[in-house]
Amino acid sequence: DSGVTQTPKHLITATGQRVTLRCSPRSGDLSVYWYQQSLDQGLQFLIQYYNGEERAKGNILERFSAQQFPDLHSELNLSSLELGDSALYFCASSRDIYNEQFFGPGTRLTVL
Amino acid sequence: AQSVTQLGSHVSVSEGALVLLRCNYSSSVPPYLFWYVQYPNQGLQLLLKYTTGATLVKGINGFEAEFKKSETSFHLTKPSAHMSDAAEYFCAVRRGGSQGNLIFGKGTKLSVKP
């Protein structure tokens, strides 16, 4: 158990819908990262937050957004969902940007 | 720009045989390198990391990796494979500067034959 929790574990929804994925980092970790894992793209970095502020953006679509709240949990919002958004979404946390990242169990999103 | 290349999307070994998973990196700054393992339907677990200092890094479950700057490599090895080592392995480099995200290779799926 990495100490990073993600909910829900599975999510099945339809095209055009909007979903929210939630992540609670390890106690004391200030940095949260979101990654997408798909068969064709592999593991891709989406976005990073540090102590409530956006720090870096990767290959994140405009339909996707995220935030980190004062209690340091983070949410990833995916809207206008398409079939191609079906993937595993991982959250990771670290003490700061220089320390190793610990990954949550992931949320498997299926868009039908 | 930084990148990671993992040679071999699938490696198969016999139980008790040497495991060698190859990783080459490209980085314009001194790299921080990582190996993660992913078991089916699970998240990624950190096996080992290289930041600075000793170039031979020991990790969990008997794995180790050697950082070779001249070869830009960070290959993962284990002297004797066990059935429980069957999983997918990812090599990653940490993005430099004020960002800390990881750039992953495409992964190598390790199969262990009895």
Image (cartoon, coloured by chain):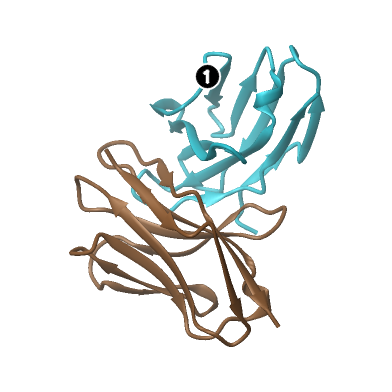
Q: Secondary structure at mark 1?
A: loop
Report which colour depicts chain A. Answer: cyan
Task: Say if B35 sits above or below B53 in the image.
Answer: above
Q: Is A43 situated left or right of B7 in this image?
A: right
Residue A81 locus on image (x, y percent): 69, 17
In the image, residue B20 above or below residue B71? below
Q: Residue at 45% of width from left, 49% of height from top? A: B105
Chain B: its colour in the image is: brown
Q: Residue B113: which quarter of the image?
A: bottom right
Of B30 and B80, nearer the camera is: B80
Residue under numbered circle 1: A61
Looking at the figure, which quarter contains the C terminus of chain A? top right
Task: Please count the marks in the image.
Answer: 1
Q: Is residue B82 above or below residue B40?
A: below
Q: Amino acid at mark 1?
A: Leu
Using the image as rendered, state which of residue B66 and residue B19 is in the foreground: B19
Residue A17: give x, y in percent of width and height: 75, 14
Q: B97 or B69: which is nearer to us? A: B69
> What percent of the width, then of the height, locates residue A38?
61, 38
Q: Chain of mark 1?
A: A
Q: Residue A110: x, y in percent?
A: 76, 31
Disc 1 crowd, CA 10 A, few/some/many (<14, 14-19, 20+) = few
The quarter of the picture where the N terminus of chain A appears is: bottom right
**Quarter holding residue A86:** top right
**Residue at position x 43%, y 29% in the image:** A58
A51 w.r.t. B23: above or below: above
Q: Kindly identify the residue that appears in the image at 25 percent across and 39 percent down.
A: B97
Residue at point 63%, 21% (across, down): A77
